[in-house]
Amino acid sequence: MPFTDSHATQYLAVRPRKKPPSHTAAQYDVMRLHMRAEIYYAR
């Protein structure tokens, strides 16, 4: 699957310098897993 701009934006949203308070730790972990999976399958 191609790495699109939306994926890049999602990646930046998941890895901020400071974790946004709007996300719980669980949501943060889930988003990180999704991003890791997308990067893995994009190879």
Image: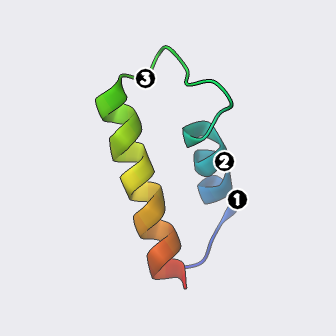
Question: In the current view of this chain or complex, which residue is farthest to the left?
Answer: 26
Labels 2 and 3 touching (C-beta < 8 A)? no
| Residue ID for mark 3 | 23
Horizontally, residue 12 falls left or right of residue 28, namely: right
**Is disc 1 placed on a helix, strand or loop?**
helix
Q: State whether residue 41 is above or below residue 25.
A: below
Marks 2 and 3, the one that precedes in the sequence = 2
Query: Which tag is nearer the camera, tag 2 or tag 3?
Result: 3
Residue 5 numbered mark, or none: 1
**Residue drawn 47% across and 68% down?**
38
Labels 1 and 2 touching (C-beta < 8 A)? yes
Residue 22: percent from left, percent from top: 47, 16
Figure quadrant of the C terminus: bottom right
Marks 1 and 3, the one that precedes in the sequence = 1
Spatial separation of the CA atoms under disc 2 and disc 3: 16 Å
Residue 9 numbered mark, or none: 2
**Is disc 3 placed on a helix, strand or loop?**
loop
- The quadrant holding residue 36 is bottom left
Question: In the current view of this chain or complex, which residue is farthest to the front?
Answer: 17
Q: Amino acid at mark 2?
A: Thr
